[in-house]
Image (cartoon, rainbow, N blue to C red):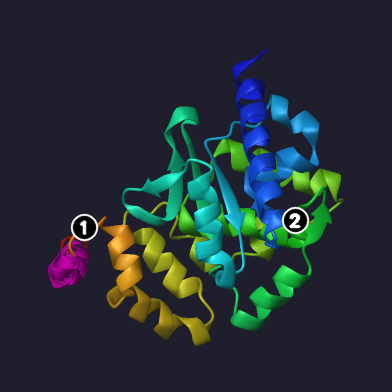
Amino acid sequence: MNKILARNILIHQEIKKIKDECCNNNIRLILLKGAALIELFAEYSFFREMEDIDVLVENKYFYKFLNILKNLGYQPYCGDPNVVYKKDIDLKIDILTELWYLKRKENEKLMNSCVEKDGMYFLAPEEMLRHIIIHSYIEHNHIEDKWLKDISLIKEKFNLNFGIEDYIPKKFLNFINKKIYYKGHFLQFLFLPLSKKVRFLLRKIFPSKEFMVRRYSIKNILTLPFFYFYRWASFIVFFILSFNKKINLRA
């Protein structure tokens, strides 16, 4: 049995455990990206490499879902408050409570339009395609071979004729090969609808206490002000470096 298939079978078994617990707790488990495609199209298990699982759950169930994962052996992943990790199978789960580029009502509509299969939920085909394109080009600023294959599979299986340019304006694609500090955050800010830009900035500069504790693995709450200062200082350094680089390029 090839390594990719063996790994994907292991992940499938893990997804089934999580799905069963979610069903018992009335939580809709929405699978994203590679995990969704493998569960929908079993033959893809032979080819699609899986490093982690991306899932979408309603915000009101976030902590309940975290407890489910904790009971299944997952622990917080250092450095990312929305990721948990299971050491014995070397598997990370990235938990989303919304698709960042959609407005609140659009996210609600997306949640309600998900397709159910065997107790699991999946984005509608057009949203599935849009999510992978935006995730790769905007969040990661490049596109890997596996994502190109995902896009081709979705277009083939659901008979879709949309292309990258249908979801991402050319002006954003021009940034992909530019070397810019925190380029992912920069592109996300530009790509966001106007109604979410201010919220995005405030959340980056003044995140919640819960976020800070998970993000920096804070053990003593009295040190929280120090970590806020560290975060603000990092942003200041980023702007200084960006400004200096702009001057050097002009020179």
126, 13: nearer the viewer: 13
Tell me how many marks there are: 2
Identified at 59% across, 80% down, the residue is 103
Pinpoint residue 36: horizontal percent, then vertical percent: 70, 46
158 left or right of 127 in image: right
Q: Quadrant of residue 27?
A: bottom right
Residue 17 seen in the current view = yes
Q: Residue 159's spot in the image, x, y percent? A: 87, 51
Q: Secondary structure at mark 2?
A: strand
- 89 or 80, which is in the foreground? 89
Residue 169 visible from this viewpoint = no
Is the stretch drawn in magenta largely helix, strand or loop? helix
* Residue 250 placement: quadrant: bottom left
Residue at 83% x, 44% y is: 156
Select label 1 or label 2 by which is in front: 1
- Percent coordinates x, y for residue 131 in the rendering: 63, 59
Query: In the rendered structure, which disc, 1 or 2, sits on the residue that comes first in sequence?
Result: 2
Segment colored magenta: 221-247
In the picture, the disc for residue 121 is 2
Query: What label sits on residue 40 in the rendered view?
Result: none
Q: Amino acid at mark 2?
A: Tyr
**What separation in Å lies between label 1 and label 2 (alpha carbons)?**
36 Å
131 left or right of 119 in image: left
At horizontal 61% and vertical 59% (from top left) the residue drawn is 56
| Closest to the observer, 185 or 212 | 212
What amino acid type should be assigned to the residue bearing mark 1?
Answer: Lys
Residue on which the image places disc 1? 219
Quadrant the C terminus occupies: bottom left
